[in-house]
Image (cartoon, rainbow, N blue to C red):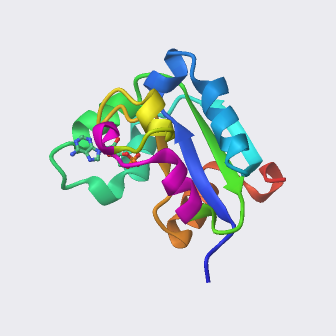
Amino acid sequence: MSGNITFTIIKPTAVSQGYIGPILNKIHQGGFRISAMRMLWLTRGEAEHFYEVHKERPFYTDLVDFMTSGPIVVAILNKENAVEDYRKLIGATDPEKAEEGTIRKEFAKSMQENAVHGSDSDENANIESSFFFSGLQRF
Ligand code: CMP
């Protein structure tokens, strides 16, 4: 059965370019409710841990450098079928392949600086949400 939460990050370039508001607007228009949100600057250790699954990939060090280059916004989004619906809303990892109207098509700069992260499964949505938010920080 599909879950009702997903986890997202608005990444450093999207934050520094002033896209927090426009991206949150897309999330709202997409029918998601924000149940937790905050702005923070990841430490290297935190970024390495979050992206541990990509540790052996050639882009891992660059990805960690990028994700620690400035503040990010993290949030938990609620909606029926949240993981799948949010992945549709954000579009393909590579913004050149993302469909018109998706968040990455409109706000991403490149495959790495792709504006937002979205969980790829219900299990990871729970793991990622718990990494950033305690129960008391979720509404
Ligand atoms: P994200 O959804 O946060 O999950 C892993 C991230 O790694 C991805 O978004 C991109 O930012 C980055 N990534 C994935 N594939 C590549 C690639 N081939 N080259 C560079 N960065 C990548």
The residue lying furthest to the bottom in this view is 1
Of the four image quadrants, the one with ligand 1 is top left
Q: Position of residue 136 (x, y in %)?
A: 82, 53
- Residue ID at (30%, 31%): 110
Please tell me in which quadrant of the rendered image residue 2 appears: bottom right
- Residue ID at (54%, 49%): 89
Q: Note whether 76 is above or below 114 in the view shown.
A: below
Q: Position of residue 22 (x, y in %)?
A: 63, 26
Of residues 39 and 76, the one drawn nearer to the viewer in this rendering: 76
For residue 75, side relative to residue 18 (left or right): right
Read off the magenta span.
84-97
The residue lying furthest to the front in this view is 100
| Membership of 71 in magenta stretch | no
Q: Position of residue 62 (x, y in %)?
A: 24, 34
| Membership of 95 in magenta stretch | yes
For residue 88, side relative to residue 95 (left or right): right
The residue lying furthest to the left in this view is 58
The residue lying furthest to the top in this view is 17
For residue 139, side relative to residue 102 (left or right): right
Q: Position of residue 52 (x, y in %)?
A: 34, 55
Please tell me in which quadrant of the rendered image residue 129 appears: bottom right
- Count of residue discs: 0
- Residue ID at (46%, 43%): 46
Q: Main secondary structure of the magenta part?
A: helix
Of residues 48 and 10, the one drawn nearer to the viewer in this rendering: 10
Please tell me in which quadrant of the rendered image residue 114 appears: top left
Position of the N terminus, as image quadrant, is bottom right
- Residue ID at (53%, 28%): 41
For residue 106, side relative to residue 55 (left or right): right
